[in-house]
Image: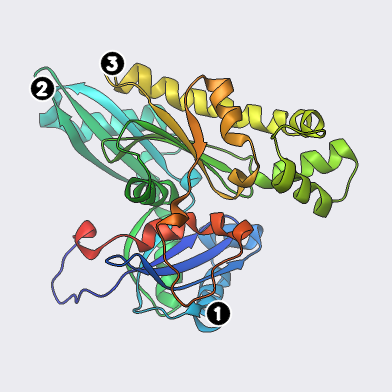
Amino acid sequence: MTKLFFTDKQLVGLDISNTGIKVMAIDTKKWLVLGYGAMDLDPTLIKESLEGNNNYLSDNIRALIKDKIVGELPSDHVVISFPTARSYSRTFNMPTDVERHLREAVELEVEQYVPVPASTLYIDFEIIERRKKDITVLMAAVPQVIVDKCLAAVENAGLTPVLVEPSINAVAHLLELTEDASMPTVIVDIGPNSTDIAVLDSSTIRVTGSVSVGGNNFTHDIAKRLGVTIENAHQLKVLNGLSAGPRQAKIKAAVEPSLSIILAETRKVMRYYNERISDQRKLEQLLVVGVGSNMPGIGDYFTNDLIMPARVANPWQQLDFGKLPEPARQFRARYITVAGLASLRVGDIW
């Protein structure tokens, strides 16, 4: 990326997920939220926008910026996140003598671990650690069509894209700034319809995973098991959850099948880190974020099942909404990714 003829402006975060779009701007010197907004969208039409030719995404980005902002956005320069499930990120160790042919070695890793042709991907990599006998390489790959469609939608909406990254990277950035995430940390981001898992170590996402199970699954599981409406199931989830009480056993039994899928992928990501990346550093904690983290007792559930300290992260104590009305408590978690994007400074990119 070049800075020729480019003027730095305040950055605005734009989160494009499978279920909607969110936008936020933050004065990072004061941690003051300048403006924010969100729109829920049709997942099928979003998918078509990211893979086909409709204008659904760009039209709704334009509508969000025009009509749905609480406060003000200071510029048209946006940093964009796209669904982590559409990306592939791995860290691996290689002998030092491979460095002379590093691109070829990385492409062999891509062909081995990424289930789509390398010719259809944007592939990037960097050496993040050096030792006497080997190096640690971070690799990221994403389908070219996803990045191209995101950029086109943002530009068609009248905005200037500055950076594009997977949503889990933005989450990790925010947690580093607002939580004690300096130690090797597992991040579990439970969205409405999917969950992203990552290991954050030394300010770098080392490995990621994703499953198509999220907070909405918990709600439907409770509704089906207890024979209640979706609305009542949601209330049971956010008010009772997995905390001790007369309904704990029934709610736990309802959501355990979905939680077991998330836990299985979490163990898989942790095993990859332990076996292929680190033979010295130990995973110290697990942080749960996202809309699915609003189920009481979920931190303790992960602690007991994985036998490691786990808790729900709370970055909102760092953000000051000033005179702006804050999002309702039950909706705050949906803004964690876009807050991570908005907390990036221009210098972090250049």
Mark 2 or 1: in front is 1
Estimate the x, y position of residue 253 in percent, counting from the top left: 77, 28
Q: Quadrant of the C terminus?
A: bottom left
Name the foreground residue: 204 vs 211: 204
Q: Which residue is mark 1?
A: 63
Give me the residue at 32% from left, 28% from top: 109
* First along the sequence among labels 3 and 2: 2
Name the foreground residue: 340 vs 100: 340
* First along the sequence among labels 3 and 1: 1
Q: Bin the neighbour count of mark 1 within 10 Å (Cα to Cα): few under 14, some 14-19, many 20 and up.
A: some
Q: Residues at badges 3 and 2 in contact (C-beta under 8 Å)?
A: no
* First along the sequence among labels 2 and 1: 1
Please, what is the three-letter code of the amino acid marked with disc 2?
Asp
**Residue found farthest to the front:** 245
Give me the residue at 44% from left, 65% from top: 14
Please, what is the three-letter code of the amino acid marked with disc 3?
Asp
Estimate the x, y position of residue 13 in percent, counting from the top left: 40, 65
Q: Which residue is mark 3?
A: 279
Q: Secondary structure at mark 1?
A: helix
